[in-house]
Image (tube, grey):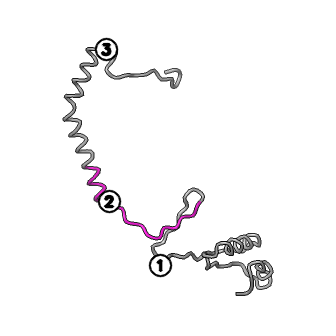
Amino acid sequence: MLGRVKDLASIARKEFVDEIVIAVPQHSEVARKAIWQARRNHIDVKLIPDLFGADPEQVAIEKFCDVAVMTLCEEPVPRIGLLLKRTADLFLSAVGLLITSPLLCAIALAVRLDSPGPVFYCAPRVGLKGQ
């Protein structure tokens, strides 16, 4: 340790410092001041985060909007399970449509016989060239 955060500019000039490493993220105010001083003096800043015992090889840093997000652990996506679920969803919905289609046809026929208009409501929409 060569000095305090307030002395960073003079120490950086005296010792030809071009990069600082912050390894005390639990003291956020001190780290914030050091980062501000480093940026002001065009010094590179690296931060050693507290990984809370997580394996550093599994850590991923991403950007979410304007916020840096550090993923410490992530469960793998069960691709086979998702594929089976999608297949079951499609199959069961097709079976459901087949089973309910006589009822839907009866409802459509009742609407057609009871009302002068079409079975399906179509509202006019304004689009390209008034179409």
Instruction: For marks 3 and 1, give the CA distance.
Output: 70 Å
Report the residue at 69% width, 78% height from top: 19
Residue 44 in the figure: left or right of residue 117:
right
Q: Position of residue 28 (x, y in %)?
A: 64, 72
Question: Label 2 belongs to which residue?
Answer: 79
Report the residue at 34% width, 15% height from top: 117
Instruction: Indicate which disc, 1 or 2, sits on the residue closer to the N terminus.
Output: 1
Which image quadrant: the N terminus? bottom right
Do callouts 3 and 2 mark residues in contact (Cβ within 8 Å)? Answer: no
- Quarter of the image for residue 3 reads bottom right
Question: Label 1 belongs to which residue?
Answer: 53
Vertical order, 6 against 109 (above or below): below
Which residue lies most toward the bottom here? 1
Q: Position of residue 11 (x, y in %)?
A: 77, 83
* Magenta residues (range): 67-87
Residue 78 in the figure: left or right of residue 48:
left
Instruction: For marks 3 and 2, give the CA distance.
Output: 49 Å
Instruction: Indicate which disc, 3 or 1, sits on the residue closer to the N terminus.
Output: 1
**Camera-side residue of 119 and 6:** 6
Classify mark 2: helix, strand or loop: helix
Question: Label 3 belongs to which residue?
Answer: 115
Vertical order, 28 against 16 (above or below): above
Instruction: For marks 1 and 2, give the CA distance.
Output: 28 Å
Classify mark 3: helix, strand or loop: loop
Instruction: Indicate which disc, 3 or 2, sits on the residue closer to the N terminus.
Output: 2
- Quarter of the image for residue 113 reads top left
Amino acid type indicated by mark 3: Ser
Classify mark 1: helix, strand or loop: loop
Amino acid type indicated by mark 2: Arg
Report the residue at 60% width, 58% height from top: 66
Q: Residues within 10 Å of mark 1 (few under 14, many from 20)?
A: few
